[in-house]
Amino acid sequence: MNTINLEILGTGCKKCQQLEANAKSAVTAQGITAQVSHITDPIEIAKRGVMSTPALVINGKVVSKGRVLSPEQIQSLLP
């Protein structure tokens, strides 16, 4: 099975940290292998077309911007 790549885009604010925690919970609940990273560089975030953080990227595709998804919502987006 391929590893899923999850990226949290955000400056490290409380909402960004919550989204990262929820993403990790979603991965654990699904029992899948995933790499979770947090990108805080505003220039890199802007390059991805994200102007509202936090944002969630799954395998290179921005799937959420400007809100904190619950672990259940994230699970429904996982491939």
Image (tube, rainbow, N blue to C red):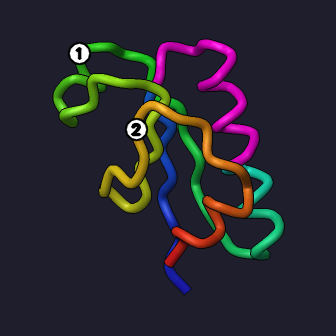
How far apart are the two marked residues, 1 and 2, measured between alpha carbons? 16 Å
Query: In which quadrant of the rendered image does the N terminus lie?
Result: bottom right
Q: Residue 13 location, x and y as percent?
A: 61, 13
* Dominant secondary structure of the residues highlighted in magenta in the image: helix
- The part of the chain drawn in magenta is 10-22
Q: Residue 62 location, x and y as percent?
A: 33, 50
Residue at horizontal 30 percent and vertical 26 percent from the top: 45
Residue at horizontal 70 percent and vertical 74 percent from the top: 32
Q: Amino acid at mark 2?
A: Lys
**The one of 24 and 22 positioned closer to us in this rendering:** 22
Circle 2: element type:
strand
Q: Left or right: 52 with respect to 19?
A: left
Q: Amino acid at mark 1?
A: Ile
Q: Which mark is residue 22?
A: none
Residue at horizontal 27 percent and vertical 23 percent from the top: 51
- Single out the mark in the foreground, 1 or 2: 2
Q: Left or right: 38 with respect to 60?
A: right
**Dot 1 alpha-carbon crowd within 10 angstroms: few under 14, some 14 to 19, many 20 or more:** few
Residue at horizontal 79 percent and vertical 54 percent from the top: 25
Is 18 colored magenta in this rendering?
yes
Image: 77 above or below 52: below
Q: Left or right: 13 with respect to 66?
A: right
Is 71 colored magenta in this rendering?
no
Instruction: Give the labeled residue for mark 1.
Output: 43
Residue 60, by quadrant, is: bottom left
Image: 27 above or below 35: below
Instruction: Give the labeled residue for mark 2.
Output: 65
**The one of 6 and 76 positioned closer to us in this rendering:** 76
